Image (tube, grey):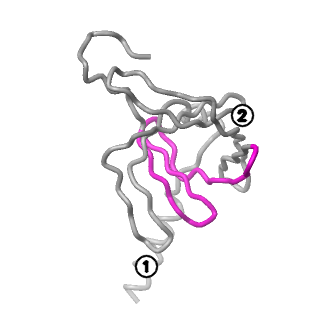
Amino acid sequence: MKKTFAILFISVLFICCKQKINPTDIAKINGYWEIEKVTFDKGDDKDYKINESYDFFEIKDNKGIRKKVMPQLDGTFLVNDTFENVVVRFADDKVFLDYQTDYAKWTEEVITLSAEELVLVNKEKTEYHYKKATSINLLGDGKTTK
């Protein structure tokens, strides 16, 4: 009986503690995000120690873009013209990012969103854990990075 109660209590606590993401929180997505790990549906994790590219989000009024950028040693980023259109969608107390390119459409659910952490999950139940990225400046030239 005690085990049943404990399991029930933990389950309710887990469900109640799920982060509610408000429309005002969406602005936190803007900026550079570095992937930390990917958790697959079967529970396997892939950790990323070093990333050659970051995801850059720019969203305003629930529409925007996501593109891959490559950090450089001088604190700048290499970018190209390739990007994905993003639309933020709210449904059933959940938040989704709907992506579209000329070749594909897909959706990811926003599980966690803060100023420093972003967790997205796709339809295959693969979770992408990001941390807010900062520019790298190993040259120490004293220049301000953008």
Residue 75 position, x and y percent, is 36, 22
- Residue 123 lies in the magenta stretch: yes
The disc placed on residue 7 is: 1
In screen coordinates, is 90 left or right of 112?
right
69 above or below 98? above
Q: Considering the whole magenta stretch, tell me its main secondary structure.
A: strand
Residue denoted by label 2: 63
Specify start and end residues of the magenta stretch as a single range: 102-131
Seen as rendered, the residue at the extreme bottom is 1
Task: Tell me which residue sits at (63%, 29%) in the image.
Answer: 81
Q: Secondary structure at mark 2?
A: strand
Given the image, on which type of amino acid does mark 2 rest?
Answer: Lys
49 above or below 124? above
Graded by Cα atoms within 10 Å as few (under 14), some (14 to 19) or many (20 or more), the crowding at tag 2 reads some
Residue sitting nearer the eye, 45 or 101: 101
Given the image, on which type of amino acid does mark 1 rest?
Answer: Ile
67 above or below 15? above
**For the C terminus, which image quadrant?**
top left
